[in-house]
Image: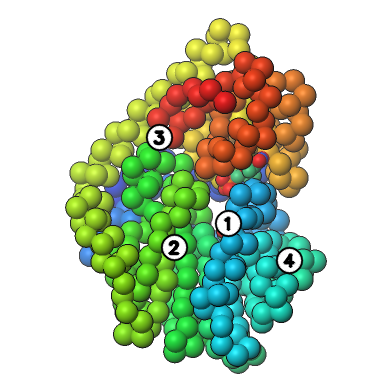
Amino acid sequence: MERCRCCGGVLEKVLDFGRMPLADRFVTPDEVADEYFFDLTVGMCTGCAMVQLINVPEPELIFRSDYPYRSSGSIRMAEHFAATARTLAARELTGQDPFVVELGSNDGVMLRVLAEEGIRHLGVEPSAGLVELSARRGVRSVAAFFDHDLALRIRADHGRANLIYAANTMCHIADIGSVLSGIDALLTDDGALVFEDPYLGDILRGTAFDQIYDEHVFYFTLRSAQRMLAPHGLEVSHVEPLDVHGGELRYTVTRRGRRPVDTTVTSLLAAEDDAELTDPAALASFRRRVEETRERLPTLLRELRSAGRRVVGYGATAKSATVTNYCGITPELIEFVCDSTPAKQGRLTPGAHLPVVAPETFSAHYPDHAVLFAWNHATEIIGNESAFAAGGGQWIVYVPEVRMIAG
Ligand code: SAH
Ligand code: TMP
Ligand code: ZN
C-alpha cells in the first residue's frame, strides 16, 4: 500500500498515465537505448486529501548539473520574479540586515534583484551548472538539495532567515517532511515562508493534465497545504492567486499565531469546499476530459498530416513530455519542436524523440500549424511570432481543449 508523504495516510490511485520518461531529460540518439522510464500515476490521500504522484524517481536522477530549465527563458517570468523580489523586500525584509533564503533559485532570476540591493541572500539549487550561472549574475547559492540537515548548516553559517522563498519548488520535493522541519529550524520567529506552485483548482478547471510529470510531486490546494504545514507549527496566513504557469497560488506561511489569518485564506477555503476540489467525482470528470484530449489531439494531427500540412511544436516544455508520450505523438505527426533553450537544442524530446531545434528554424520557413506546448507563455510567444499567424499559420492548443486559434 502506498502512503501519503504528508500525513502517512493511504493513497488511492486516481490517474494512470502509464510509462513516462523524465520530463527534462533531453536525449542524444545514443542515449535513446537506455532511457529511463517510470509509472506516472497520481494518488489522493484518504486522510489529508493531498493529491500527489505515487512513484517518484530519485531526485538525483532528475536535478543533475545539466538540468536544462532556465527560469529567465521567459521575459514575462523574469518580470514576474523581479516584481516578486521588490514586493517581498518591502513586505518581509525591512528589519536590520535581513537574510533571505531561496529554495530552487535556478538561474538567480529572483535573487539577482535582491543581490543588487545588497540584501544578504543564499540560493539553494542542486544543479551545479545553475549555481555557476547565478554566480556570474552576482547571486550567491549553494549546489545542494534543501532538507533538514542543510537548514541546520545554513543556520550555523548565516543565522536564521527572515524570509524563505520557493517558486515551483516545494511541489518538486518528495521528502517534504524534511523540508518543512528544516524551514522550522531556519526561519526567525516572525519570519515568513512564501511559496508558489501550480494550483490543483486551475489544473482541474483547465484540464491541464500536462502539469502532471515526474518533477511535480504535489498538486496543492489551500486545504491540503494547510494540513501539510500544521504538524510543523506553521499556518497559511495569506494566499493570493497568480496568473502564471496556467494558474498558481502564492502562500504566505508563518508560525502559528504570529500573524492574523486574513480573509484571503478563509474565503478561499470556503470556495474550495464549494468546488469540492478533491471529491473523487471531480477527478473522475477530469480523467474523462483528459482521455478526450488523448483522442482528439493525435486525430487532428493525423488529419492535418494526411492533408499534406506541415506541423511543428513550439516550446520543448517539461509538460510536453506528458502530452507527447501519453497521446502517442511521434516525429511523423510533429516534424520538430523549437525552443530557445540552448541545452535542449540538437537533442530529442524525452520518450517521444521529437528533434529540438532553435526558434530560428521555425521562422526561417514557417509551417502550416504549430502546437503550442508552452501554452502558459501564449501571450509572449504568439506576440513574438506574430508573423507566423499573419502569414496564415495556425496555432494549435490542447488546454483547456484541443482547438486551433488565430494568432
Ligand atoms: N524557482 C524557479 C525554478 C523552478 S524549477 C522558477 O520558478 O522558475 C525547480 C527548481 O528546484 C530546479 O531548479 C531544481 O533544480 C530545484 N530543486 C529541486 N529539488 C530541490 C531541493 N530539494 N532543494 C532546492 N532546490 C531544488
Ligand atoms: P515552461 O512552460 O516550463 O516555463 O517552459 C517553457 C519552455 O519554452 C522553455 O523550454 C523555454 C521555451 N520558450 C521558448 O522557446 N520561447 C519563448 O518565447 C518562451 C517564453 C519559452
Ligand atoms: Zn495525507
* Chain-order first, disc 2 or disc 1: 1
Q: Which residue is mark 2?
A: 250
Residue 231 rendering spot, x and y as whole percentages: 32, 79
Quadrant of the rendered image containing residue 153: bottom right
Per the model, the C-alpha gap separating discs 1 and 4 is 18 Å
Point out residue 119 in the picture as x, y percentages from the top left corner. Answer: 67, 79
- SS assignment at label 3: loop
How far apart, in angstroms, are the residues tagged by discs 2 and 4? 24 Å
Which sits in the foreground, 34 or 287?
A: 287
Visible residue check, residue 143: no
Mark 3 or 2, nearer chain start:
2
Q: Are marks 3 and 4 in contact (CB under 8 Å)?
A: no
Callout 1–callout 3 Cβ contact below 8 Å: no
Q: Is residue 22 visible?
A: yes
Callout 3: few (<14), some (14-19), or many (20+) C-alpha neighbours within 10 Å? Answer: some
- What residue sits right under mark 3 in the picture? 400
Question: At 63% from the left edge and 34% from the top edge, which residue is drawn?
Answer: 383
Q: Earlier in the sequence, mark 1 or mark 3?
A: 1
Which tag, 3 or 4, sits closer to the chain's start? 4
* Residue at screen point 43% across, 50% down: 247
> Could you say which is closer to the camera, residue 374 or residue 172?
374
Residue at 39%, 54% in the rendered image: 199
Residue under numbered circle 1:
80
Q: Which labelled disc corresponds to residue 134?
A: 4
Q: Earlier in the sequence, mark 2 or mark 4?
A: 4
Q: Mark 3: which amino acid?
A: Pro
Tell me the SS state at disc 1. helix
User: Residue at left 33%, top 56%?
Assistant: 51
Indicate if the residue with disc 4 has its beta carbon within 8 Å of ligand 1.
no
Total numbered labels placed on residues in the image: 4
Sequence-first disc among 1 and 4: 1
